[in-house]
Image (cartoon, coloured by chain):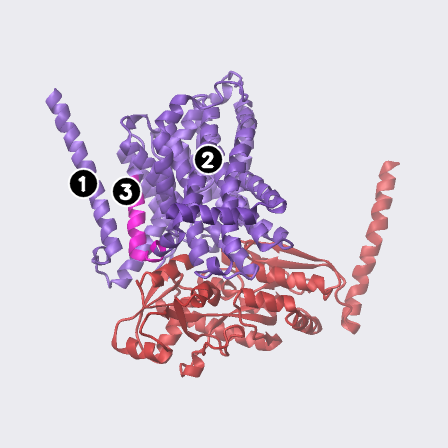
Amino acid sequence: MSLFKQSLLKKVMVLPITAALLVSPFSVAKDLNYPTKNLKYTIAFGPGGGNDLMSRTVVEILKKYKFYKKNIRVDNLAGGSGAVGFNYVAQQAGNPYHLTSTSGNFLGTPLVSNTGWTYQDFTPIGLLAQDAMFIVVRADSQFASAKEFVEYAKNNRITIGGTGAAGPERVVASLFAEAAGFNYDYVPSQDSGGLITSLTSKSIDAIIANPSEVSGQIAAGNFRPLAYSEAQRSTIYKDVPTFKEQGYNFAFSLPRGVVMPSNVDKDIQQWWVETLKKVVNTPEWKDYLETNSLSGNTIWGDDFSDNLAATNADFKRILTQIGAIK
Amino acid sequence: MFFAEILNNLSFGMSVALTTTNLMFLLIGAIVGMIVGLFPGFGPAAGIAILIPLTFGLEPTTAIIMLSGIYYGSMYGGTITSILINTPGESATVASTLDGYPMAQQGRAGPALVMQAIASFVGGTLGVILICGFAPVLAQFASSFGPSEYFLIIMLGLLLLTTMMGDNKLNGIISALFGFAIAMVGVDSVSGAQRFTFGSPELISGIYFVPVAIGLFGIGELLYCIYTGQHKMEKDRVQFNFRSRDFWPTAKDYLTSKFTFIRGSIIGFIAGVLPGSGATIGSILAYSVEKKVAKDPERFGKGEMRGLVAPETANNAASAGAMVPLISLGIPGSGATAVLLGALMMWGLQPGPTLIDANPDLVWGLVASMYMGNMILVALSILAIPLFVKFLDIPYRLVVPVIIILCVIGAYALNNSIIETSMLLFMGLIGFGMKLYGYSPAATVLALVLGGMAESTFLQSLIISQGSLQIFVERPLSLALTLFMVGAIGLSLAFRAYKRYQAKRSN
């Protein structure tokens, strides 16, 4: 008796789900009946980091303004510098109910280890923020501009610090030296605290750092930013010139963007481009950019692919040059 | 003058912090911190990060007060596992296992836990007072530390490791070298090339402290206890309550360690001010200074109260000290303070040298709340001790699976990494062997933590100086540290020679 009841209950519950499954592919193809299911937002890093913060801000906005009609589940799937979480999303090829946020490791980790995926295994939606770098010197140093710095570096030995041995900081330093034609010694710090004190203690000449790492010191008048590594000026630090406009022809910034698994319908990709364009226009997003000193210049859809490819190529070339990868 | 400044700052801070809301959230933070500290591997950084979303609706000051409560509260909880099951949850409490665990084994778990709480309180409170008086001066001091100075401080820590290695120095050194070997795994800090990672993404960022420490200490100890047949022994029931005399430390405990409290706090605080592994080096320094000044150093490592008080006051004073670079320079000294820094930025505050002037209510309110938080925590810890001591009543054969499960969860939860979990079990086997043959797991895990930092700061210094060792004597601070180290070695050698000479003469 109870057995019969149970199976009946099961049938009653399963029926609408099967019906929904049968209907949905048709409607997607027709007039984009999307979304019909809950979204899973995977964060490939632990809670509290930059990627986590950005992802949760995006999800908060999607929920608050009801841009996504169904529920959104957020999961931190950390491990192997992003390898685990991005791999999980890459495995969901064709499933339009998965999103994840990119950051430096999205390009860096596949370059240095066997992850089984690269940036090409994802459908790009948009680059929501640019995580570019400053070159910073002490305010009491002799360098008032990037030009003076280069002049000096051409005739003298110069040391530039950054976080990590083969990270984006080193790529920016190398691209700058290459474009300006000087040699330098790179001093890698293990964390941002060590990086900042290596400059305050007058151990080195300059550092490459994220604006958020040095904003306090800049505001206090201890540090001076000489140039910014994005293609355009930061939307936050409008008075710091880019490397490009000072005649050093390169740009490098880490993609803080959103991607989906590969083989997702073009219409759904477009749906997300439109939706995220609404997200970046909210005051909440502007607050996020401001507090994290991120630049809000956006790139959408296939242009984002091109941007990823270019950044990846620079990254790969410099890492090969310094011997971090073969 | 400093005294007036301390009072001024504290009373202003109290006026901010003493509201019902703030006190309530401070209490929540303190409790969460203690619980977070209790689970090996689940440190304050993760605890703070998970609770940040809960603080969105709060005033920034209230939120920061609560999150900081988690941070220093975890220092109280963290030692409990070091004492009861010989498992340090983070590197700052490794030194506390050396005398804390033997005390528990001798049936003095009650006094050890009470003294740990009191030592934490003294360290934390003296730390707060030092922040109020000296924050600007100390911030200046911290910002003049470059790679060469850090290398020398870490070397000092490594040098003092020898006091913690136990009786067999050769075994101790082998243990430390094993720790260095583990520290080699991962990305080379200068070239970015990978060492011993075998292409596996899980190993790129190196082998983390938690699986090694929990394996060597926790699992190793369990295996050893089973090997010696402790699970078959009938135990006397431990009868502890607040009225029982065995529960409280004796007058002798307090008397012998009265200066230990002060020395430990000051050493810990100064080490904590330096960004980096402050609390770890502070606890090593405090422990070895205590052992060096003691007339009876042979008692250390066998359940000596001073051997517990020194690292405990030091690591709590260090967590207060780490607030100095955080609030006055915007420089995080540890994983947990880095998350706090992120939280500050989320509320639109700009961490950095301008924070104290721009938001004095936040800064001094926070500092004053730390003062009260320490009072709450010492009361909480002492009240909770009977509960923890009850744990020792449980038959050992039932405890073993529970601890193993806790250890595995702790190691897995950190990075969801199955590789780290198997590493934990493997390290457990090694830890068992170390215990059996008299090697020192403390030396291994501390060498693992300090070794990586020593390598990277040494190489940074050499890049800066183009390979010349002169950098360690050219900069004034470096020179002072180098002289101090040489002096310490020289004194220690002279002292030993003198003792030998005396012994010869009395023969």
Marks 3/1 in contact by CB < 8 Å: the verdict is no
Do badges 3 and 1 share one subunit?
yes
Q: Are marks 2 and 1 on the same chain?
A: yes
Is residue B142 one of those drawn in magenta?
A: yes
Verify CB contact (< 8 Å) between mark 2 and mark 1: no
At x 67% / y 58%, what residue is drawn? A40
The spot of residue A174 in percent (x, y) is 37, 72
User: For the point 52% across and 41% down, which residue is it?
Assistant: B372
Q: Which chain is purple in the rendering?
A: B
Q: Is residue B323 above or below residue A252?
A: above
Please tell me the numbered disc located at residue B87. Answer: 2
Q: Residue furthest right?
A: A1
The residue to which callout 1 is attached is B490
Residue B371 within the magenta-colored segment of the rendering: no
- Residue B502, by quadrant, is top left
| Chain letter belonging to callout 1 | B
* Numbered disc 1: secondary structure: helix
* B348 left or right of A179 in image: right
Chain identity of mark 2? B
Q: Is residue A71 visible?
A: yes
Hue used for the chain lettered A: red
Type of residue at label 1? Gly
**Callout 3: SS:** helix
Q: The residue tagged with tag 2: helix, strand or loop?
A: loop
